[in-house]
Amino acid sequence: MVSLKEEYKSAIKQLRDSGNDNADFDAGQLFTCAFGFDIHSPKAEAETAQGLVAFKMMIQKRCGGYPLQYILGEWEFYGITVKVGEGVLIPRQDTETLVEAVIRKNRNKSPVIVDLCSGSGCIALALEKELSPKEVYAVEKSEKAAYFLNENIRLNNSSVKLIKGDCLEKVLIDSLPAADIIVCNPPYLTKEDMDQLQREVTYEPEEALFGGEDGLDFYRDITRAYKTRLAHNGMLAFEVGYTQAEEVMEILIQAGFEDVRAYEDYCGVKRAVLGFYTEKGNVKVY
Ligand code: GLN
């Protein structure tokens, strides 16, 4: 018999051999998830513990390229824990750039926020926590993603209102109140990107990734459909793919937005685009 610590070391080797560059981290996370204590605990010297079979199965799955986050069942985003699993996009650090830019540029004390293509709800939940908004709406059309979104609202004791449906459907658009902030991380990968997905990403929902031939379909459609849904001086904020900032800025400028800017992540990549809509006569009063 070998100790759990030895099992852990062998797991790292298996993960490495499967081509995993983050083998130590992944093995550590899965170890804690399976056993309920970490590798530095004295309990890791034991030869067995409840969870050993689960641990081995998790390592097998991970070796096959199945995303770590789906195995763990939860992930952290902007200091918030969200549940994830098949059918919902895994929150990424890229998206924290968008959240930070929205917080920095917010012009309202208690804004009404609408999060489109909300997925796990990570953006809506982070903004709710940081901005003391009046109301937050999270729109999601996928049944599976909406399940996780609903769970995440519940688990975070959140007041975010889930709207299940297609954010481009007129009835849904008309049912939303005028918003001070409309935020969206739309599907934005191009046809070419979709043909070269990293192994892990192939397990994530295509409908959360693919943004049409040039990846820009949702930017065009959402900008057109939602600019009149903004309150006066309201903000539209998008996450963008790493080469799309200029094109998305152009879409916003063409639609009449002002103060259109791109915001960089810590590596200097433009990851978010924001603009304000000041044209009068578009405000609906509810
Ligand atoms: N950032 C995701 C990726 O790396 C794409 C998510 C999206 O399309 N919004 O693939």
Image (cartoon, rainbow, N blue to C red):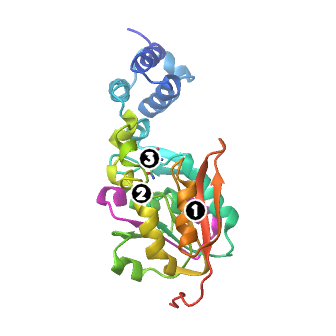
Quadrant of the image for the N terminus? Answer: top left
The front one of 82 and 154 is 82
Mark linked to residue 119: 2
Q: Give the mark, 1 or 2, whose residue is nearer the N terminus.
A: 2
Residue kind at label 1, given as amino acid type: Met
Marks 1 and 3: which is nearer the front? 1
In the image, what residue occupies the spot 34% across and 69% down? 166
Label 3, residues with CA under 10 Å away: few <14, some 14-19, many ≥20: many
Q: x, y percentage for residue 114?
A: 50, 71
Front tag of 1 and 2: 1
Residue at the image position 38 percent from the left and 70 percent from the top: 167
Compared to residue 162, the image places residue 272 above or below, namely: above
- Secondary element under disc 1, as helix, strand or loop, is helix
Label 2, ligand 1: CB separation under 8 Å: no
**Could you tell me which secondary element the residue under label 3 belongs to?**
loop
Is 251 placed above or below 256 here?
A: above
Residue bounds of the magenta highlight: 126-147
Say which of 51 and 245 sits in front: 245
Q: Which mark is residue 249?
A: 1
In the image as oriented, which residue stretches furthest toward the left? 143
Mark 2: amino acid: Gly
Q: CA distance from mark 1 to mark 3?
A: 26 Å
**Rendered image: mark on residue 90:** 3
